[in-house]
Image (spheres, rainbow, N blue to C red):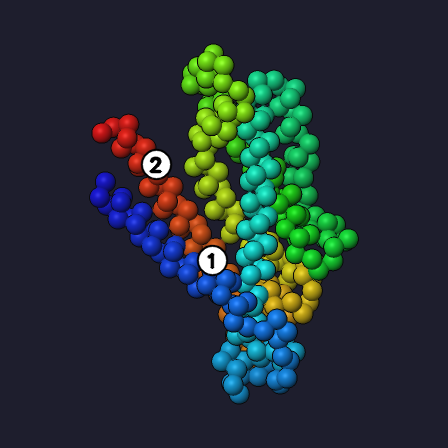
Amino acid sequence: MRRGARRRHRRVTGGALLLALPVTAAVVGPLVTPADIPSDGPPYALGGGHPLGTDALGRDVLTLVLRGGASALGVACTAVALAVAVGGLLGLAAAASRSRRLDDLLIRPVELLLPLPSLLVISVVGVGWRGHPVAVALAVAALNVPAVARLLRAAALDAASGPVAEALRLQGESPARILFGHVGRAVLPVAAADAGARVGSAVFTVAAANFLGLGLDPTSPDWGVVIAASREALFVQPWAVCAPTLLLVLFTVGVNLLADGLLAAKAEGKATAWNP
């Protein structure tokens, strides 16, 4: 037990440490950097007053990295939050419906999005909002809703049809109270673990969309855009690619380690409560 506790502690600590750098850059960076980044330096230069060099437009890469984290991480986290909210509501409602017809009506329509390529959906949604982060966030959220709905529906079936739910119905509790108070709490660990994994994949989906020019403006300081714009000069000015890539990797790994450690601790707490 102690060995397991130490392992969980290492996961939580390691995840928090890995998250510290990208999250700090995303939160503090926009506060200490100018909104209009000067482009008065030579392209792809190293040194010369620029700790990480310059990009193709002569902009300071360190300033770009500090400025671009808010959009890179903010869009991904917003998309996952929307996906969990919408998909979770659909999944819980389907599990608690006790009607096959209503179950199909809630789940089948969103499943139509499952086979669609993610970048195709992002490009279609972004037609009217070209270069707007809201379009990318909505598209990534829509792509994740079907999987979230199916997962949480499956996780909620036992709780929705179990003896506790039946007892609550016999006591006259409202469907909303049963749905959110009992069923929702039962699937919360599953939802949290899934959200942690999806944040990592959403970060890279957003970065890939921006990398391919389907998301934000090509001059945006977003990490994915900076990687895309500088990839051809990787061996000339490696920091323009390596710095934002490293921050994306740190964020993704950190989120997953932190989520795994916290959920394992929560599961152990429940087991201890049942077996004192």
Q: Residue furthest right?
A: 128
Q: Please, what secondary structure does the residue beneath circle 2 have? A: helix
Q: Residue 205's x, y, as percent?
A: 60, 53
- Residue 145 visible in the current orientation: yes
Looking at the figure, which quarter contains the C terminus?
top left
Report whether 2 appears left or right of 140: left
The residue that appears at 58% across and 26% down in the rendered structure is 93
Q: Is residue 22 visible?
A: no
Residue toward you, 61 or 150: 61
Circles 2 and 1 in contact, beta carbons < 8 Å: no
Q: Which residue is mark 2?
A: 267
Quarter of the image with the N terminus is: top left
Q: Residue at x 45, y 26 (%)?
A: 182
Q: Residue at x 73, y 49 (%)?
A: 125
Give the mark nearest the N terminus, 2 or 1: 1
Image coordinates for residue 145, horizontal then vertical, percent:
61, 39
Residue type indicated by callout 1 = Phe
From this view, report whether residue 276 is shown above or below residue 66. Answer: above
- Amino acid beneath label 2: Ala
Q: Position of residue 11 (x, y in %)?
A: 34, 51
Q: Residues within 10 Å of mark 2 (few under 14, many from 20)?
A: few
Between the C-alphas of marks 2 and 1, the distance is 24 Å
Residue plotted at (31% across, 52% down)? 10
Vertical relation: 125 (above or below) 208: above
Q: Position of residue 114 (x, y in %)?
A: 64, 39
Few, some or many C-alpha atoms within 10 Å of disc 1 (few <14, some 14-19, many ≥20)? Answer: many
Say whether residue 10 is left or right of residue 85.
left
Q: Which residue is mark 1?
A: 251
Foreground of the two, 170 or 272: 170
> Looking at the picture, does residue 163 appear above or below residue 106?
above
